[in-house]
Image (spheres, rainbow, N blue to C red):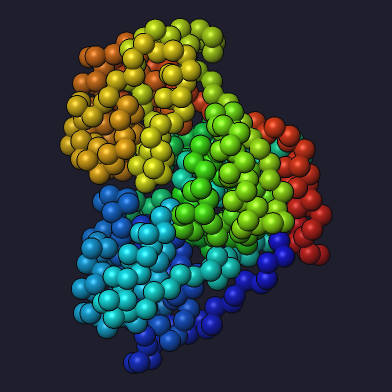
Amino acid sequence: MSKGTVQKPETKDTTHKKDARAVIICGAAGRDFHNFLAYWRHQKWAKVVAFTAATQIPGISDRLFPGEIAGGAYKEGIKIYPELQLPQLIKEHGVSLCDLAYSDLPYNTVGHLLSAINAAGSSFVTLAPEQTWLQSTKPVISICAVRTGSGKSQTTRFVCAILKKLGKKVVVVRHPMPYGDLIKERVERYERPEDLVKYQCTIEEREEYEAHIEAGNLLYAGVDYEAILREAEQEADVIVWDGGNNDAPFFKPDLHIVVADALRPGHERLYFPGETNARIADLLLINKVNAATEDAIKAVEGNLRTVNPKAPILRCKSTLTAKMPDLSHEEARGFIQGKRVLVVEDGPTMTHGGMSFGAAFQLARQEKAADIISPASFAKGSIKDMYSTYPHLKNVLPAMGYSSKQVGELHETIREACKHVDTVVIGTPIDITKLFPIPKPVVRVRYELEPCDAKPLEDAIKKVFGSRPPGMV
């Protein structure tokens, strides 16, 4: 990329002056921790006094970011508070700056948060991606998006397949989802299905990791991305960054690919920091064009061209396949056609991603299911609460499972709904039946990227290996 140089930390001094300015990092267990480790802890003029955790991800507040990872002047660790306490914390600690460090936020939400921070007496900042980029000794290809659920993971798998055909050893590094013990999750390495159990992965983590393991892609994730990168480099010819939500990459990319969603025209300019991704992209993909109108596709193209006049724009299909053990696609379709079905979709795509349907609903409708039931009346516990929080959800059940308790509530919800259907159609990437039994036939829906013209993507990937400085493989 030719987008400037990575800003170096100001100092490695681990002491703070008495007049250091107090900082709060507002996050959701991911970008916030990286911003601290890559930038804030190196600024001798600043003292991070707290993290806050948004309600976007349940159960991640009231924890401690451990001193064993924070290091230096933060050996006692840093407390994580619910974001609702932010105005109070600003006043209590005399906070000068609040860093917005989480993603997939509509601009009006960003504006309301900015106003609340200013009203409490603090300034509002966001760090540019370059300020927290880590430099790799290996080529880096990053796949990010303008919205959650645009198709990053299927794009990442497609890119990995191209790299393998080129004879490259690929290591995928996934955007963080550290929802448990942060010390144990500092560096995680996934190669076999057993590793999902070893690291006690939530459903949300499995949704991102399981398909990579099935495809034979070695994957790293965790909390400390400097340590993760250095370990990944030992096993890779090339690092592929698999982004989360619509966040920017943590590593300086040699090729930055950004995915937009043809089913959500306009969103590429309405959500933070998705528009930032679009503006710095080297290559823009519009996914799901096979399910969208030409007017919608052209609207997305126009918006992308407005914010990024130079990057090539590629159209891609998201192809759906019905999967059942020992059955063909055609045979599996028979369990949907004319049947009453329960549709289970990817969780984050439906909730803070704002989608009202996903791949499973699309296939059920395409295969002419007799009825797609509304699951809300069967929902239990936090799953029931979710339908109040996200009223746009009607005929889909998001596969929510951020904790073992919530996984149990999801199980109860599916078990109750199964009394009223013939088939369960599942669009989440994971095999839920490995977590709990489902008493009705299960059709899994797999979706893969299919570029309308793959050559520009293949050419862009090949160019990466001719553009590294001497001494960098």
Residue, far bottom: 18
Which quadrant would residue 124 be assigned to in this image? bottom left
The residue that appears at 18% across and 32% down in the rendered structure is 380
Q: Residue 471, percent across and down?
A: 78, 64
Which image quarter holds the N terminus?
Answer: bottom right
Compare residues 95 and 225 and report the one nearer the observer. 95
Residue 32 visible here: no
Compare residues 167 and 302 and report the one nearer the observer. 302
Residue, far front: 295
238 on left or right of 356:
right
380 on left or right of 41:
left
Q: Residue 129, percent across and down?
A: 55, 65
The residue that appears at 38% across and 35% down in the rendered structure is 356
Number of callouts in the render? 0
25 on left or right of 268:
left
Residue 274 visible here: yes
Q: Residue 223, percent across and down?
A: 44, 58
